[in-house]
């Protein structure tokens, strides 16, 4: 049987994953990965090295019969290049919070309503524009050398195509910069110039199934996408589906036609990779909350899970607000975590484990409510990411979220979405691949406990952090 092979790339914070997929069925044929260095800033060349080690460079030249390739990557990362294409500074990643003062200053200068109504988001430290402002203010000698600004997926696509004169991006990734208007589908060059101190080139924005180019090996390179938009593609998310991803970070997003303009800054009005909107909330503290608590208890993650399952479902009143690395949603870049409700009777390892799980899921449930407040329909939650495989998380998810929860068969959905886009660019028609569901969970008739826990969580968040 002759298969038509397409490849999807997920260049994430932690690693580069490369998947080969049957273009007609979506069947996974091969998967490889290579790690990225830890940290919140990185030389972009490390991304290319991992891409090569994972087989991406060979695939881009047609090895293995590859016909098309799509790149997805972590959003917002600042790749600031000089006139010869060399980085003037390490790429500052989405989880680098050093630009929090610049985010606050940009919001104050223009007003939150302007940002929400005209751009689609309100600046926080994650977004590219704030990182350019940080560079301008703290390393002005480097900022003056910046000739063009890219995002991680733009930079990889540009290198795959041999660094052409004009780089490309897509609407989903451009929408997370802070200098692209989702509502008008145009760059706001004035905002970029105000942040950086001078004008700079930016990639051309491609449509959902446009081709970025063709490699010397004859492989079509698609527009690419931001990681969450690619995940929505990979999952085949429809109106009413809300994706909750528990990975290094936590994300809550939906592919929708709803127009988002949230002046509070809670919901970022990003674009999706199919021509619609992708309202999104992100938390810095995802599954690492559980790993950190396991370390505190001196157990591995398997034993941690067993402890959480052995605890009373409400952790006997123990409550964790897990802002261990600061937080993006709510916007608390300098926060630390809190443990409340402590009594001598409930200070037990199993309760601490369960409190960590509850804190993680309650934070994501708050994000889900914020989406609802913006008119986004919530019919069911699609739960993905490494943390979604925790039995302790699965036990409480539907009750805390208050809607049915489905868990797809575990897979690399960001990379799969990039492959799906590659197949779209190859044929011009959106590929109708089937989504396989592994587990379905429904809210219980006794979920009052979850309502009570969420109320206490909100009360303590307001009391301690005033948000």
Image (cartoon, rainbow, N blue to C red):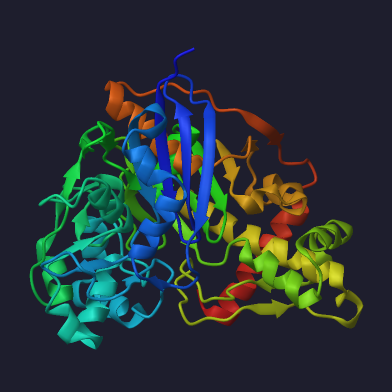
Q: In the orientation shown, which residue stands out farthest toward the right?
A: 345
Q: In this image, 139 relative to 386: left or right? A: left
Q: Position of residue 116 (x, y in %)?
A: 27, 59
Residue 422, quarter of the rendered image: top left
Note whether 263 is above or below 101 in the view shown: above
Residue 414 in view in this figure = yes
Q: In this image, 72 relative to 183: left or right? A: right
Q: In this image, 146 relative to 60: left or right? A: left
Q: Position of residue 408 (x, y in %)?
A: 61, 35
Note whether 460 is above or below 364 in the view shown: below
Residue that appears at 71% across and 67% down: 356
Residue that appears at 18% across and 74% down: 195
- The answer to which of 342 and 411 lies nearer the viewer is 411
Residue that appears at 35% across and 27% down: 423
Residue that appears at 29% across and 25% down: 426
Q: Position of residue 321 (x, y in %)?
A: 64, 72
Q: How many marks?
A: 0
- The answer to which of 140 and 98 lies nearer the viewer is 140
Residue 58, quarter of the rendered image: top left
Residue 456 in view in this figure = no
Q: Position of residue 379 (x, y in %)?
A: 54, 35
- The answer to which of 218 and 462 lies nearer the viewer is 218
Note whether 208 is above or below 204 in the view shown: above
- The answer to which of 328 and 74 lies nearer the viewer is 74
């Amino acid at each position: 049987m002759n298969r038509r092979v397409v490849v999807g790339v997920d260049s994430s914070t932690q690693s580069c994953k490369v998947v080969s997929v049957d273009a007609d069925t979506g069947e996974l044929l091969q998967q490889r990965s290579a790690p990225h260095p830890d940290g919140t800033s990185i030389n972009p060349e490390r991304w290319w090295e991992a891409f090569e080690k994972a087989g991406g460079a060979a695939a881009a030249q047609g090895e293995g019969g590859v016909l098309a390739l799509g790149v997805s990557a972590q959003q917002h990362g600042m790749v600031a290049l000089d006139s010869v294409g060399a980085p003037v500074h390490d790429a500052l990643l989405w989880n680098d919070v050093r630009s929090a003062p610049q985010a606050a200053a940009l919001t104050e200068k223009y007003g939150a309503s302007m940002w929400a109504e005209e751009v689609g988001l309100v600046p926080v430290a994650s977004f590219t524009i704030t990182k350019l402002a940080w560079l301008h203010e703290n390393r002005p000698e480097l900022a003056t050398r910046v000739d063009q600004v890219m995002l991680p997926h733009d930079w990889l696509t540009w290198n795959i195509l041999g660094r052409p004169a004009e780089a490309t991006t897509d609407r989903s990734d451009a929408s997370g910069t802070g200098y692209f208007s989702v509502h008008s589908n145009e760059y706001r060059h004035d905002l970029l110039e105000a942040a950086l101190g001078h004008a700079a080139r930016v990639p051309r924005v491609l449509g959902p199934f446009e081709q970025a180019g063709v490699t010397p090996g004859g492989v079509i390179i698609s527009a690419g996408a931001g990681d969450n938009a690619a995940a929505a593609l990979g999952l085949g998310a429809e109106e009413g589906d809300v994706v909750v991803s528990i990975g290094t970070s936590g994300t809550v997003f939906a592919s929708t036609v709803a127009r988002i303009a949230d002046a509070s800054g809670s919901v970022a009005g990003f674009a999706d990779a199919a021509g619609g909107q992708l309202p999104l909330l992100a938390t810095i503290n995802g599954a690492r909350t559980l790993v950190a608590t396991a370390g505190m208890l001196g157990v591995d993650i398997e034993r941690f899970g067993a402890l959480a399952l052995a605890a009373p479902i409400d952790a006997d009143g123990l409550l964790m607000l897990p802002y261990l690395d600061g937080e993006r949603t709510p916007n608390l870049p300098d926060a630390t975590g809190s443990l409340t409700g402590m009594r001598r009777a409930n200070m037990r390892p199993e309760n601490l484990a369960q409190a960590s799980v509850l804190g993680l899921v309650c934070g994501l449930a708050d994000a889900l409510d914020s989406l609802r407040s913006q008119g986004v329909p919530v019919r069911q939650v699609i739960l993905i990411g490494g943390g979604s495989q925790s039995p302790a998380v699965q036990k409480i998810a539907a009750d805390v979220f208050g809607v049915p929860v489905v868990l797809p068969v575990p897979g690399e959905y960001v990379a799969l979405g990039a492959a799906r886009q590659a197949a779209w660019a190859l044929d011009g028609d959106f590929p109708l691949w089937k989504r396989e569901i592994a587990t379905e969970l429904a809210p219980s008739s006794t979920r009052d406990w979850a309502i009570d826990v969420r109320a206490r969580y909100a009360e303590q968040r307001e009391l301690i952090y005033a948000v």
